[in-house]
Amino acid sequence: MRRGSLTLAVVGVLGAALALSACATGGTPDARITPRTQVNNPALATLPDVPVIRDQTYATDAGIPQRLDVCTPPDDVTAADTGPYPAIVEVHGGSWARGDKADLGYRAICQWLASAGYVVFNLDYRFAPQNPYPAGFDDVRSAVEWLRRPAQVARFEIDPDRVGAFGGSAGGNLVSLLGTTGSGSWTTGSRVAAVVEMSGPADLTGAAVNPDFLPDQLAYLHCTTEGDCPDARGASPVYQVDRTDPPFFITHSSDESRIPIAQSKEFVARLRRAGVDTTFVVVQGRAHSIAMMNDDLKNRIVAFYQRTLGAKPVGVLK
């Protein structure tokens, strides 16, 4: 495995430099990435050398267990660093109505982040419409509280003061809400110290929504129309921002239609106005959520977690 600090690949866009607009408070300049066109994305390949502990129960609702998988750093990493390790909660997408922690793309991300020296908790959560908002969000919060319990801290050798989150699409919405809910210390309860989200819906009140996505959004909120949807604002991270929120890394495709980039731009603007450390990366193209992942973006995400959660730059398995 390659060791040493990660090198961030700088990819030109129309011959221009990556830096575009003003820096975020404590963050990085906005950036654009032009990925190579790939039929099968090698950035989402699973890593057989990274251990996965499957189906751990973190909560129970009406007698039904909610489970997560745990990806732990491989032997090469643990030989260089005996822990305790920072933890990352990973939340898959699927319009709040489908998806699975075992989906290969999210399993690949779980193992990749573990290869960088994190213990990753890749969770399933309750789905709409049977379990509308806030059920899935409550599950995500429960998972963070569960991993902070002394038994889990000892079992997985994690540092409960260094917990981050990662999510894509609906999962991006949930981890963004996780990062913006509450105030004060990032080291207790369900608070987290860093958030990475990809293509997450930030505003569920009907602003900049794709009409094809609107039925999924309304089903999640248990509403029939945008005009009569009392939970829409509470489920929207953009309206929960305050100055105590943790650092955010937000990435979105330039031309994707499922979740228009305008939502991420407004979320970034509000975070920065509040003085929150915010990094914004735009990937050229139409790819949604984790489908936009490439090596440059992976390097940037790990560098963000290293800066905010303090993991040692031990290198990343490819």
Image: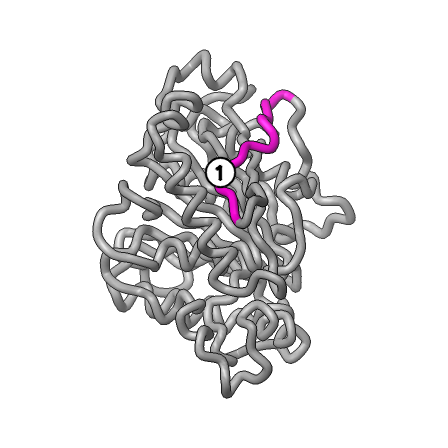
Q: Amino acid at mark 1?
A: Tyr
**Residue extending farthest front:** 63
Task: Read off the magenta span.
Answer: 49-61
- The residue lying furthest to the top in this view is 79
Q: Nearer the viewer, residue 102 or 108?
A: 102
Q: Is residue 67 above or below residue 315?
A: below
Going by the image, does 71 lie left or right of 257? left
Q: Position of residue 115 (x, y in %)?
A: 53, 27
* 80 horizontally vs 182: left or right: right
Q: Is residue 262 visible?
A: yes
Residue 18 at least partly seen: no
Name the quadrant of the N terminus.
top right
Front one among 177 and 114:
177
Magenta-colored segment: predominant secondary structure? strand
Give coordinates of residue 310: x percent, y percent. Answer: 33, 33
The residue indicated by pointer 1 is: 58
Q: Residue at x 33, y 27 (%)?
A: 150
Q: Secondary structure at mark 1?
A: strand
Residue neighbourhood size for the residue with mark 1, other residues' Cα within 10 Å, grouped as few (<14), some (14–19), many (≥20): some
Q: Is residue 290 above or below residue 252?
A: above
Q: Residue at x 62, y 53 (%)?
A: 292
Asked which quadrant contains residue 318, the reply is top right
- Which percent across, then down, holds residue 8? 47, 40
The quadrant where residue 93 appears: bottom right
Q: Residue at x 59, y 24 (%)?
A: 50
* 52 in the magenta segment: yes
Vertical side of 77 occupied by 187: above or below:
below
Q: With respect to residue 297, does 314 lie above or below? A: above
For the point 33% across and 41% down, the residue is: 308
How many numbered discs sit on the rendered protein? 1
In the image, residue 110 lies in the stretch drawn in magenta: no
Residue 77 pos. (x, y %):
48, 19
